[in-house]
Image: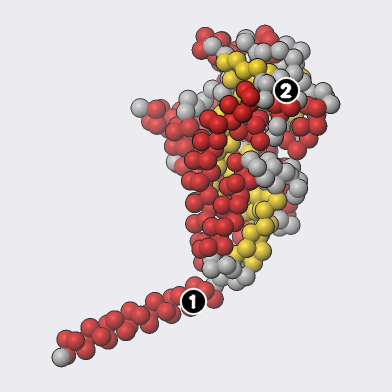
């Protein structure tokens, strides 16, 4: 009898404390509208992952945290959105690491060519010590780095000729992402590198302001670059991550519970996006071929030559970014490789 009573009291206490915790958590989550910007269009991997993130956030917050997504750089290019986040004029975004190197120079490591051999290695570094340390460095600059999505291994397209060797890049005006390392790499390979925001790229290709560009297969397909670029060369010369970020100014006004829910939804979007990106990459090759692109793959011997050619750039930036950081990076890659 007494035992039964004890159990009942215990059960009642448990039910009560759950309810109290539930009420407290609910009170800690206010109805909010979060603006999330990205550079690619709605049919891209970014578009699908942004919608996944919005749905997930709505689900985990019981409908309180609503996210409105803006694709096609409608809130601005990566650089412009970064500034808007720092200033607190926009809540969240996803963008490439390359333009972040202007704020935290160490993000430039992802512009060093021929670093990763596989997506698995990239995941290990990004989700490991080095990748997470880099995200933390953003806070001092007014950004909260949440998770990495996959942009992916980049390949070259152009309107002039197939690239079979570095020499074929001579005279090609090639749009590159906006940082010194990217500029150095492509100029050293022989191209005339032109830094430009992604949001201006399609028009620049169409009007022949530039002859070529480099991006992952998924982007070449979703941005319809095949309409204006007859040649695709598989080089996988660099792997770019995307970073999902929040404005620190805004983040600091959130309750710990709200921050936790956003982190949770972001983690789910990371897993969704990487899987989707890898599946889409395989499909995209077929679409590009069907749309008449002439596709060639640079031989392993030529990749080795290109690697040698850009070694002075790698050496220069190893010094600038810090030889210890580059050593840590190579050690982490090696560990993932074995
Ligand atoms: C989209 C960019 C794009 C990147 C680039 O805003 O700039 O070429 O690959 O994904 O971040």
* Residue 190 left/right relative to 25: right
Location of the C terminus by quadrant is top left
From the image, tell me which residue sits under label 1.
24
Compared with 138, 31 (above or below) is below
Image coordinates of residue 165 in percent, x first then y, are 62, 9
206 relative to 129 in the view: left or right: right
Quadrant where the N terminus sits is bottom left
Q: Earlier in the sequence, mark 2 or mark 1?
A: 1
Compared with residue 239, is residue 314 higher up or lower down, i.e. above or below? above
Q: Residue at x 59, y 56 (%)?
A: 54
Separation of marks 2 and 1 at Cα, in angstroms: 56 Å
Asked which quadrant contains residue 207, the reply is top right
The correct choice, above or below, for 202 with respect to 212 in the image is below
Locate residue 277: give its quadrant. Answer: top right
Q: Please name the residue shown 62% across and 43% down the image.
A: 46
> Between 230 and 79, which is closer to the camera in this rendering?
230
How many numbered discs sit on the rendered protein?
2
Q: Of discs 2 and 1, which sits in the foreground? A: 2
- Mark 2 nearby-residue class (10 Å; few <14, some 14–19, many ≥20): many
Residue tagged 2: 229
Quarter for ligand 1?
Answer: top right
Q: Secondary structure at mark 2?
A: loop
Q: Residue at x 65, y 42 (%)?
A: 43
Residue 116 in sight in this render: yes
Q: Secondary structure at mark 1?
A: helix
Q: Kindly indicate the quadrant of the structure image that contains residue 180.
A: top right
């Amino acid at each position: 009898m007494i035992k039964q009573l004890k159990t009942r009291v215990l059960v009642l206490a448990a039910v009560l404390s759950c309810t109290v915790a539930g009420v407290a958590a609910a009170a800690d989550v206010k109805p909010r509208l979060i603006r999330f910007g990205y550079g690619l269009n709605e049919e891209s991997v970014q578009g699908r992952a942004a919608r996944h993130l919005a749905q997930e956030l709505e689900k985990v917050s019981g409908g309180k945290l609503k996210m409105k997504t803006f694709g096609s750089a409608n809130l601005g290019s990566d650089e412009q959105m970064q500034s808007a986040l720092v200033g607190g004029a926009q809540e969240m975004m996803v963008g490439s690491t390359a333009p972040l190197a202007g704020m935290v120079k160490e993000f430039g490591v992802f512009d060093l060519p021929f670093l990763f051999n596989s997506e698995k290695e990239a995941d290990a570094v990004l989700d490991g010590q080095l990748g997470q340390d880099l995200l933390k460095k953003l806070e001092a600059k007014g950004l909260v780095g949440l998770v990495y999505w996959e942009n992916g291994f980049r390949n070259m397209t152009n309107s002039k000729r197939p690239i079979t060797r570095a020499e074929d890049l001579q005279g090609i005006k090639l749009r590159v992402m906006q940082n010194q390392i990217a500029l150095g790499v492509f100029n050293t390979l022989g191209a005339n590198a032109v830094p430009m925001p992604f949001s201006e790229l399609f028009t620049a290709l169409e009007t022949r302001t530039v002859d070529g560009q480099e991006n992952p297969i998924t982007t070449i397909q979703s941005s319809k670059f095949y309409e204006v670029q007859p040649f695709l060369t598989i080089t996988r010369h660099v792997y770019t991550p995307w970073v999902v970020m929040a404005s620190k100014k805004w983040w600091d006004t959130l309750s710990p519970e709200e921050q936790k829910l956003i982190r949770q939804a972001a983690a789910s979007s990371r897993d969704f996006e990487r899987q989707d990106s890898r599946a889409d990459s395989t499909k995209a090759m077929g679409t590009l071929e069907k749309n008449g692109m002439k596709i060639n793959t640079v031989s392993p011997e030529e990749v080795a030559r290109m690697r040698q050619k850009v070694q002075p750039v790698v050496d220069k930036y190893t010094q600038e970014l810090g030889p210890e950081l580059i050593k840590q990076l190579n050690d982490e890659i090696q560990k993932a490789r074995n």
